[in-house]
Amino acid sequence: MTRAVLWYVTHRITLHPDTDVTFEAECLHCEWTARPSEDGAAVDIECMGRSGHKGFRRRCTSFAMVARIDSDERPDSLSAEVRPHEDTGGGV
Ligand SMILES: [Zn+2]
């Protein structure tokens, strides 16, 4: 006889602790790009200071990591993903 044991492990995704968020912008009409910065307002100001550039593509880049949440620290509001784990035991 074979039986299966299923349980759920809760994970969360969060900003990687050793990284920063980077803001970037580029003109929609020419090759101009703003200097990437960790300060989004600084990038916006650089865009506004360039006469003749009316539209920009802005990017915000961050790095994330997925970590397992132990059952004793599991706040339901932070649960982003639940995956079943299957363990097929030997016959009983
Ligand atoms: Zn331009």
Image (cartoon, grey):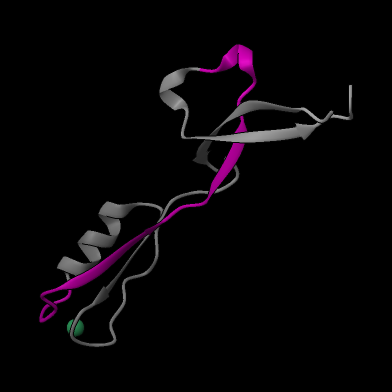
The answer to whether residue 3 is left or right of residue 78 is: right
Give how far across and how far down residue 9 sits, in percent: 62, 28
Q: Residue at x 60, y 44 (%)?
A: 18
Residue 58 on the magenta span: yes
Start and end of the magenta stretch? 50-74
Question: In the rendered view, would you say 3 is above or below 36?
Answer: above
For ligand 1, give the image quadrant.
bottom left
Q: Position of residue 82 (x, y in %)?
A: 53, 33
Residue visible at 62% across and 12% down in the picture: 72
Foreground residue among 92 and 43: 92
**Relative to 41, is 68 on the left or the right?**
right
Q: Position of residue 2 (x, y in %)?
A: 81, 30
Q: Residue furthest top?
A: 72
- Residue 68, quarter of the rendered image: top right
- Above or below for 43 versus 84: below
- Asked whether residue 36 is drawn in magenta, I would say no
Measured as percent of width and height from the top left, residue 91 is found at 89, 27
- Left or right of 45, for residue 81: right
Residue depicted at x 46% and y 52%: 62
Q: How many marks?
A: 0
**For residue 26, which quarter of the picture?**
bottom left
> In which image quadrant can residue 35 be found?
bottom left
Q: Nearer the viewer, residue 77 or 51?
A: 77
Name the quadrant of the C terminus: top right
The N terminus, quarter of image: top right
